């Protein structure tokens, strides 16, 4: 049975500031699918930007190729800021294809007495509301770590990430494996800070949530198929490695190549 997620405590209760670089490669592609080749790099920075919230910046640059031989260079940039108490969330995502801006999502979310209110600036100005059980990204990641530490193996959550066009909510289901506490011999530069930390294999499946259209839902064998799923080895400080992104007709492998830990702000002085 899945354990429903509620509102968590401070958004940075587990995470430490870090910068992780991943090499991305094609793991699998269905014959006749839209993707025939893929390679790129992903950089994720978790920054204690101030003592009121935590910022997460990511950049994902990749070149994909089709079976017909055409290629596309994509540069996806995301900047997010989330309040320590998960009361607010800001997001900005820009996608460039062959150096041309093709998508932009900009907005902010606030928790109110009437639930979560989202104000969207782009791609189309507007507002949308959801119930207060909706979680934000850092909030959700911390809840995963809390559940893992408590030896709880499933987590259901309604997740809002500011995904294009800014009105999308995902119903997520996470499966958390048993803790791995031994030294795994990881040689990635900067990985010495991971020694001695608990880590868990985690798989999160993302399904169309509230407000989705019927055609966005797919079933197989009588069960709903996720839009995509992310598997990784998650450390108790929020670092992930051995990432697998499964989009159905193809999947991508993310290998941690470098890791660094900038100094964390001393909020006790504030």
Image (cartoon, rainbow, N blue to C red):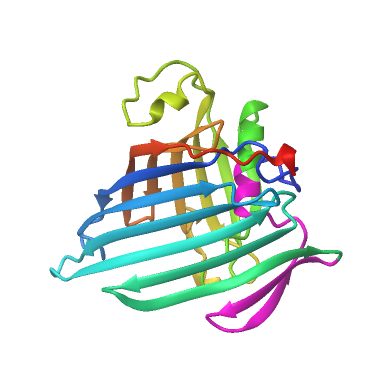
Given residues 129 and 51, the one toward you in this image is 51
In reply to whether residue 139 is colored magenta, the answer given is yes
Q: Residue 253 at what x, y percent from top left?
A: 32, 45
**Image quadrant assignment for residue 186:** top left
Give me the residue at 49% from left, 59% from top.
Answer: 219
63 to 68, vertically: above or below: above
In reply to whether residue 194 is colored magenta, the answer given is no
- In this picture, residue 29 sits left or right of residue 56: left
Which segment did they paint magenta?
A: 114-141
Give me the residue at 61% from left, 84% from top.
Answer: 125
Given residues 29 and 16, the one toward you in this image is 16
131 to 48, vertically: above or below: below
Q: Residue 103 at what x, y percent from top left?
A: 43, 76
Q: Would residue 194 be seen by someone viewing this image from the given angle? A: yes
Q: In which quarter of the image is the N terminus?
A: top right
Q: Residue 2 at what x, y percent from top left?
A: 66, 41
Given residues 32 and 258, the one toward you in this image is 258
- In this picture, residue 80 sits left or right of residue 243: right
């Amino acid at each position: 049975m899945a354990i429903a997620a509620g509102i968590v405590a401070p958004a940075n209760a587990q995470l430490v500031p870090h910068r992780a670089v991943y090499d991305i490669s094609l793991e699998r592609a269905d014959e006749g699918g839209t993707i025939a080749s893929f390679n790129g790099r992903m950089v994720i920075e978790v920054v204690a930007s101030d003592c009121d919230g935590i910022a997460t910046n990511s950049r994902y640059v990749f070149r994909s190729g089709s079976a017909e031989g055409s290629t596309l260079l994509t540069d996806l940039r995301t900047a997010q800021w989330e309040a320590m108490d998960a009361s607010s969330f800001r997001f900005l995502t820009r996608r460039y294809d062959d150096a041309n801006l093709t998508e932009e999502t900009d907005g902010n979310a606030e928790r109110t007495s009437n639930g979560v209110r989202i104000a969207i600036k782009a791609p189309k100005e507007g507002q949308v509301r959801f119930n207060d059980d909706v979680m934000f990204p850092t909030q959700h990641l911390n809840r995963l770590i809390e559940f893992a530490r408590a030896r709880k193996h499933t987590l259901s959550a309604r997740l809002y990430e500011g995904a294009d066009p800014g009105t999308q909510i995902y119903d997520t289901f996470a499966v958390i494996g048993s803790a791995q506490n031994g030294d795994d011999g990881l040689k990635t530069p900067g990985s010495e800070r991971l020694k001695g930390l608990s880590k868990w294999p985690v798989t999160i499946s993302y399904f169309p949530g509230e407000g989705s259209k019927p055609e966005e839902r797919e079933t197989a064998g009588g069960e709903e198929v996720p839009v995509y799923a992310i598997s990784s080895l998650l450390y108790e400080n929020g670092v992930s490695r051995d990432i697998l992104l499964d989009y159905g007709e193809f999947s991508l492998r993310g290998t941690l190549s470098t890791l660094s830990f900038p100094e964390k702000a001393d909020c006790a002085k504030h």
